[in-house]
Image (cartoon, helix red, strand yellow):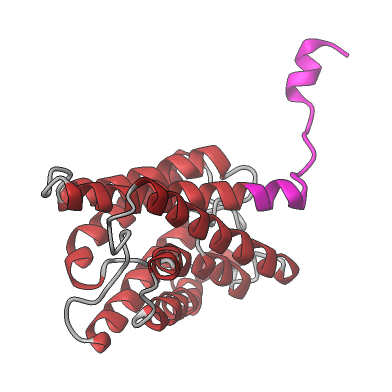
Amino acid sequence: MSAHDDATAPTSPPLLSQCLVAELCGTFGLVFIGTGAMVVNDITAGEVTHVGIALTFGLTVLSMIYAFGDISGCHINPAVTLGFWASGRFDGRRVPGYILMQCTGALAASGAIRLLFPLNESLGATVPRGSDLQSFVLECILTLLLMLVILSVSFGAKEKGLLAGVAIGAVITFESLFGGPVSGASMNPARSLGPAIIAGNLQHLWLYLIAPTLGALLAVPLHRVIHRHESGE
């Protein structure tokens, strides 16, 4: 077989173990870099800035999609995994493993942040600035819009390619810009779980587990209505 044949031969799909490791690493990267930026902003009296934090989260997600999109789909978010499953694009048997690895990656990232910055109390946790109801509704809407974009630019259950990385990273950035000061703009149960568990601040965790999941699930029927022509209905 020639070198050209080797380059063009179809590759086998990634093993489940590869996908799980990719989800763990991708979620670790997101939480470590994103919440790390928040912690550094705290200890440097705002040198990173709110805009810098929003860009950090968006650019990190964009980078993770380029790195792991072709392997696991780069969900790095339990709400996104459940959204893909509800849309019929993702095998339900893989859901528990994906969510377990995402939460493990987030916890490991927050543990690393704790080791690096032991005096920081919040570790980049998401906490409502107003009422719980206000943040619940905001997180639900933010995640609905995020999931709607993800479903629109992804192939099957995989976020991959230039379009997906830029579009999803942009949504996370602009939603973090205006939603961050109110609810923390989590849009990701794992992202909120890590800091909450490691910092021992569980008071509002329920909000960030339920609202993003609800928002992602609500995006599925809305996407079907908007893109009905693509399925030939």
The quarter of the picture where residue 130 lies is bottom left
Residue 73 visible in the picture: no
Region of the chain picked out in magenta, as a range = 1-21
Residue 180 placement, left or right of 160: left
Decide if residue 86 is on the left or right side of residue 111.
Answer: right
In which quadrant of the rendered image does the N terminus lie?
top right
Residue located 35% across and 83% down the image:
203
Q: Is residue 101 above or below residue 170?
A: below
81 left or right, relative to 166: right
* Whole-percent x, y for residue 103 in the image: 55, 63
Residue 69 is at least partly visible in this image: yes
Q: Residue lying farthest front?
A: 119
Q: Position of residue 81 (x, y in %)?
A: 57, 66
Residue that lies at the very extreme toward the right in this rendered image: 1
Residue found 16% across the figure and 53% down from its top: 50
Rendered-image quadrant of the C terminus: bottom right
Residue at screen point 50% across, 60% down: 107
Vertical side of 83 occupied by 60: above or below: above
Asked if residue 148 lies in the magenta stretch, the reply is: no
**What residue do we see at 51% from left, 65% from top?**
80
Residue 225 or 47: which is nearer the viewer? 47
Total marks placed: 0
Image position, residue 229 (x, y; %): 52, 67
